[in-house]
Image (tube, rainbow, N blue to C red):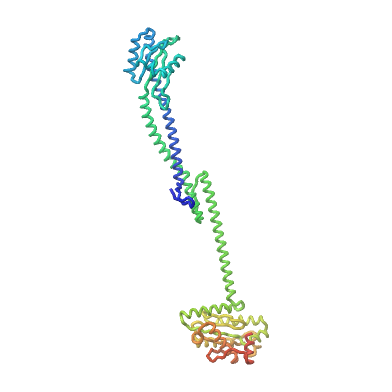
């Protein structure tokens, strides 16, 4: 039994399929067995009646010959002896016996007054029937489920002549009914035993042939509903359940294949989307010309590093680098040559700085280098090495530059000695870069408290602005 909750009617008790089948099989077994038992009982009853009738005819047939002579001679004494011998000694089942002549007069009787009294209607019917047919007649009485008496009328005739008289008798069926009742109880017990055995055998066969495959299919359906697609029902019969199992197995395989294909497609699309997102992120954070970090990515990295140094204090040095007279180079050699120069500058910076240093194209011809775990002095020395490196490196068309070669200028500022946040660090490094430009370019200037702020009041300052245009 399983409890299932009905939201509208409350809890209801739903029997399992095995219980339902068990009840149905039990009902059919009991009904079938009881029907067979009832038919057997009725057959036994008819056999008992036929046996009682044969016995009654045998008793009366034995009296016909001596009774015929006594009736012919009207020997009442002999008839009384015959009646008494049959009724009281040899056949106690004979409850009443009478001998009648052809005019229906009672010549001898085992119980005086019965033939004329209460028994007259019952015996008169069977007597008339025997008289009309000129042959023995009988009737079981009362005619209900089981008779209690047998009435028999036996004509006493000569060969080919009319009847001389009639033997009328009533036989008690008590002994026969007792045997019948005993047989009925035995039949009932046997019927119940057969019913139980039939129920057990039928339930066993149904469980093996129907219920077990059905439970297997139901379990498979539940697992499929739960998302387990790699399930198969192992039913190999050639009946409808086998066909259903094969169809469900094929459906499960197709569903599993479709799901795996869908998962592969999702994985492929996810990988493509992730790759596209990486590409978009790379495009959003990388300068398309030099391959370095762009201004936005550099600002994010700078902010992140300042968050880290708040938890684990360490020095940071920012170096801003600008190509000297880049506008003149661009105007002389054209923008493609200027793009190639920017790419070469980006490679030189990447190749000659540490892997942990963050290099970015800050904008136009200006580059930014964030040196981690580096104080102002070390950062200034590194920037000076870069300025010297660029002064010794040959660049395409550098002989047309105002100084006869291509150079860079650099401004350096450091945290925590000079700046306490990212904007302040950038602003002070930018002031140092302007100072390097004012002092004649091709040099490094480290920020100091007396480093002047940017302005455009002199011709040199306007020239510096042109460098960075």
Nearest the viewer among 378 and 177 is: 177
Q: In the image, what residue occupies the spot 45% across and 45% down? A: 18
Q: Extreme top residue here?
A: 73
In the image, residue 381 lies at what x, y percent? 52, 88
Q: Is 247 on the left or on the right of 110, as rendered?
A: right
Q: Quadrant of residue 115?
A: top left
Nearest the viewer among 111 and 460 is: 111
In the image, residue 176 lies at what x, y percent? 37, 25
Give above or below for 402 relative to 227.
below
In the image, residue 438 lies at what x, y percent? 60, 91
Give above or below for 440 relative to 225.
below
Q: Quadrant of the C terminus?
A: bottom right
In the image, residue 237 lies at what x, y percent? 50, 45
Q: Is 162 on the left or on the right of 288, as rendered?
A: left
Give above or below for 6 relative to 79.
below
Res. 442 in view:
no
């Amino acid at each position: 039994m399983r409890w299932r909750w009905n939201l509208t009617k409350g809890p209801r008790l739903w029997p399992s399929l095995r219980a339902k089948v068990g009840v149905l099989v039990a009902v059919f077994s009991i009904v079938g067995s009881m029907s067979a038992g009832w038919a057997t009982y009725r057959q036994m009853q008819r056999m008992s009646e036929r046996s009682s009738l044969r016995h009654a005819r045998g008793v009366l047939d034995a009296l016909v010959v001596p009774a015929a002579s006594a009736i012919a001679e009207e020997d009442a004494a002999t008839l009384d002896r015959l009646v008494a011998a049959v009724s009281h000694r040899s056949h106690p089942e004979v409850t009443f016996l009478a001998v009648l002549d052809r005019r229906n007069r009672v010549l001898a009787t085992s119980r005086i007054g019965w033939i004329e009294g209460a028994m007259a209607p019952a015996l008169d019917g069977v007597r008339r029937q025997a008289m009309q047919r000129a042959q023995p007649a009988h009737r079981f009485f009362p005619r209900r489920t089981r008779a209690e008496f047998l009435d028999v009328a036996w004509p006493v005739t000569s060969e080919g002549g009319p009847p001389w008289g009639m033997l009328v008798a009533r036989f008690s069926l008590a002994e026969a009914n007792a045997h019948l009742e005993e047989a009925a109880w035995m039949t009932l017990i046997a019927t119940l035993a057969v019913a139980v055995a039939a129920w057990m055998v039928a339930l066993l066969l149904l469980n093996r042939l129907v219920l077990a495959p059905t439970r297997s299919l139901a379990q498979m359906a539940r697992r499929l509903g739960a998302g387990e697609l790699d399930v198969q029902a192992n039913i190999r019969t050639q009946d409808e359940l086998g066909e259903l199992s094969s169809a469900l197995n094929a459906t499960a395989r197709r569903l599993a294949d479709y799901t795996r294909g869908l998962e592969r497609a999702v994985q492929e699309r996810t990988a493509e989307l992730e790759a596209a997102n990486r590409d978009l992120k790379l495009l959003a954070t990388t300068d398309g010309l030099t391959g370095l970090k762009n201004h936005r990515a550099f600002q994010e990295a700078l902010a992140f590093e300042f968050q880290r140094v708040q938890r684990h204090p360490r020095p940071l040095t920012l170096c801003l680098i600008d190509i000297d007279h880049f506008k003149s180079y661009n105007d002389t050699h054209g923008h493609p040559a200027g793009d190639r120069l920017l790419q070469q500058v980006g490679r030189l910076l990447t190749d000659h700085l540490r892997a942990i240093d963050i290099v970015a194209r800050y904008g136009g011809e200006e580059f930014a280098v964030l040196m981690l775990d580096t104080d102002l002095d070390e950062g200034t020395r590194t920037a000076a090495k870069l300025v010297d490196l660029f002064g010794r490196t040959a660049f395409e068309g550098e002989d047309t530059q105002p100084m006869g070669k291509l150079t860079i200028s650099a401004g350096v500022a450091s945290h925590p000695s000079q700046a306490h946040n990212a904007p302040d660090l950038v602003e002070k490094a930018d002031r140092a870069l302007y100072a390097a430009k004012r002092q004649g370019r091709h040099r490094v200037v480290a920020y100091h408290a007396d480093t002047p702020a940017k302005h455009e009041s002199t011709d040199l300052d306007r020239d510096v602005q042109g460098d960075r245009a």
